[in-house]
Structures are given as structure tokens and as C-alpha cells.
Image (spheres, rainbow, N blue to C red):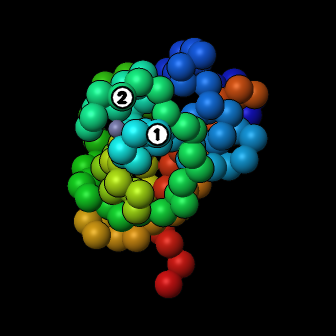
């Protein structure tokens, strides 16, 4: 955790609970609509299902499955030059939301659609912990 040259999220009052949950509790924390119960991601001020404002920040299990996968070989941002080839996955979380991330700890060719995964917190700066995933143990 010395120098981190890759793009970082901008922490705002709207998204800080998400990043605090990862940093402080190693937990995916998302907004649950108080009106209809829908858990939403990306973070937003209004429920996309019923348009109710607000919601309650709720800790998730951090478990899900790989819905889609791709391996990047091209360097689109020079900060990632040492990482190619790397995978990018769309994870279907058990609670409903989907998020883009990476599966780490296994070779890219072992990342499969349908693979069960669980959250792996990757602290990259003092403020930012990136949510990645590892295969769920059998
Ligand atoms: Zn709602």
C-alpha cells in the first residue's frame, strides 16, 4: 500500500458508506429501498424500481456468481500495463445487484461463468479498499 498509480474513485457524501463499509468492515454495503426493499447498485439517490428517495445502507453477504467474464490483453490505461492480461467480471450478487470487478487468486483461464465467488477486499490506499472477488471454497 505504498504508491497506487491507478484511477481511484472520488469519495463523496453519497458514496462514502459504500467505501467505508469495505475499508472498516470488509463488507459490501449498498442502499436498500425503504419503500420496496430493492437493493440498488450503482449508488443513487432514488430507487430505480419505485422512484422512492433515500434508503438504508445495508451490509450484503459478499457472495455471488460470475455472470460474464472477459480478459483484457490490451493496455488501455498505462497504469495497468503491468497487469495485462487481467480479467474483468460481472458478478451477480446473491442479493440482486450486479457489479463489475475482478476475480483474483486464480489464473484468468480458471475464471468461469457460473463460478461461485465471495468478496475479497483489496486495500489500495488509506481511504480506498477495492472490492474484488475470489472463488468460494467448495
Ligand atoms: Zn424502491
- Out of 17 and 128, give the one closest to the viewer: 17
* Residue 12 located left or right of residue 74: right
* Residue 134 located left or right of residue 75: right
Observer able to see residue 112: yes
- Does residue 12 sit above or below 97 in this rendering? above
- x, y percent for residue 23: 70, 38
Q: Which residue is mark 2?
A: 52
- Determine the secondary structure under disc 2: loop
- Which residue is painted at 35% across and 54% down in the image? 96
- Which residue is painted at 40% across and 39% down in the image? 35
- Does residue 113 sit above or below 55 in this rendering? below
Label 1: how many residues lie within 10 Å, few (<14), some (14-19) or many (20+)? some
Pick out the residue farthest to the bottom. Answer: 138
Q: Which residue is mark 1?
A: 34
- x, y percent for residue 27: 63, 49
Instruction: Specify the label residue 22 is tagged with.
Output: none
Ligand 1 has an atom within 8 Å of the beta carbon of the residue at disc 2: yes
Amino acid at each position: 500500500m505504498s504508491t497506487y498509480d491507478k484511477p481511484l474513485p472520488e469519495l463523496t457524501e453519497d458514496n462514502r458508506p459504500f467505501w467505508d463499509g469495505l475499508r472498516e468492515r470488509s463488507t459490501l454495503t449498498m442502499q436498500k429501498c425503504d419503500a420496496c426493499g430493492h437493493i440498488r447498485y450503482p449508488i443513487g439517490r432514488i430507487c430505480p424500481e419505485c422512484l422512492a428517495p433515500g434508503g438504508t445502507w445495508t451490509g450484503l453477504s459478499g457472495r455471488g456468481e460470475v455472470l460474464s467474464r472477459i480478459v483484457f490483453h490490451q493496455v488501455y490505461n498505462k497504469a495497468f500495463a503491468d497487469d495485462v492480461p487481467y480479467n474483468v467480471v460481472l458478478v451477480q450478487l446473491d442479493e440482486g445487484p450486479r457489479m463489475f470487478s475482478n476475480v483474483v487468486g486464480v489464473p484468468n483461464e480458471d475464471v468461469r461463468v457460473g463460478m461461485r465467488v465471495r468478496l475479497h477486499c483489496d486495500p489500495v490506499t488509506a481511504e480506498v479498499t477495492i472490492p474484488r472477488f475470489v472463488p468460494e471454497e467448495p
